[in-house]
Image (spheres, grey):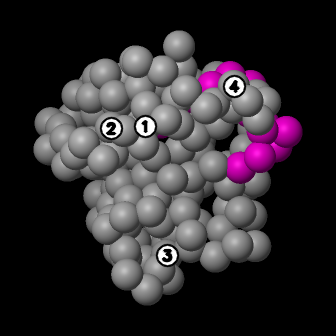
Amino acid sequence: MSVVAAADGVTAENWREAVTAAAAALVEAGAAGPGYPDACVRVVEENGPYIVLTKGLALVHARPEEGGLAVGVAVTRLATPVEFGHPDNDPVDLLLAFCTPDPDAHVGTLSALARALSGGLADRLRASSDREDLARTLKEAVSNA
């Protein structure tokens, strides 16, 4: 079972602050070490905004050895969307942060997340009433992992 966390109404001035806040939810939940948010920012700095998967949604992550302590997934809903520089899917209002302790441990959770996203998870998260509802919706989506 994955560690699930949620943050709602997060204020971010730019994509760096948004990524940092999303990854920090995993640190607070005990799924990632303290260096994980900075590692997630470096992923975007080095590789561009490929983490923006669909309209308004980014999948925040870094390599397992950069701080993954457990399989964890967190949803962060921003108060105001931010630009990542993606040509098609900006601005981003919803971030899913992901971590894993090793390269193989996360396959089931990522598969469940992909299935849930194709089944409308982003819309259900956007329609959530508060942080607890966000967490519950995400937990249901990855509970089959």
Occupied quadrant, residue 127: top left
Q: Residue at x 24, y 42 (%)?
A: 119
Badge 4, how many Cα within 10 Å: few under 14, some, many 20+? Answer: some
Q: Does label 1 or label 4 sit earlier along the sequence?
A: 4
| Residue type marked 3 | Phe
Badge 2, how many Cα within 10 Å: few under 14, some, many 20+? Answer: some
**Rounded to the nearest whole Å, what is the CA distance between mark 1 and mark 3?**
22 Å
Q: Give residue 116's mark.
A: 2
Q: Identify the residue under disc 1.
A: 113
| Residue type marked 4 | Ala
Occupied quadrant, residue 27: top right
Residue 2, x across and y down, in percent: 54, 20
Residue 28 in sight here: no
**Rounded to the nearest whole Å, what is the CA distance between mark 4 and mark 2?**
19 Å
**Rounded to the nearest whole Å, what is the CA distance between mark 1 and mark 4?**
14 Å
Q: What residue span does the magenta drawing correspond to?
A: 62-74
Residue extending farthest to the right is 65
Q: Identify the residue under disc 3.
A: 84
Does the magenta segment cover residue 45? no
Q: Does label 4 or label 3 sit earlier along the sequence?
A: 3
Up the image or down, 57 lies above or below 44; here it is above
In the drawing, does residue 123 fall left or right of residue 63? left
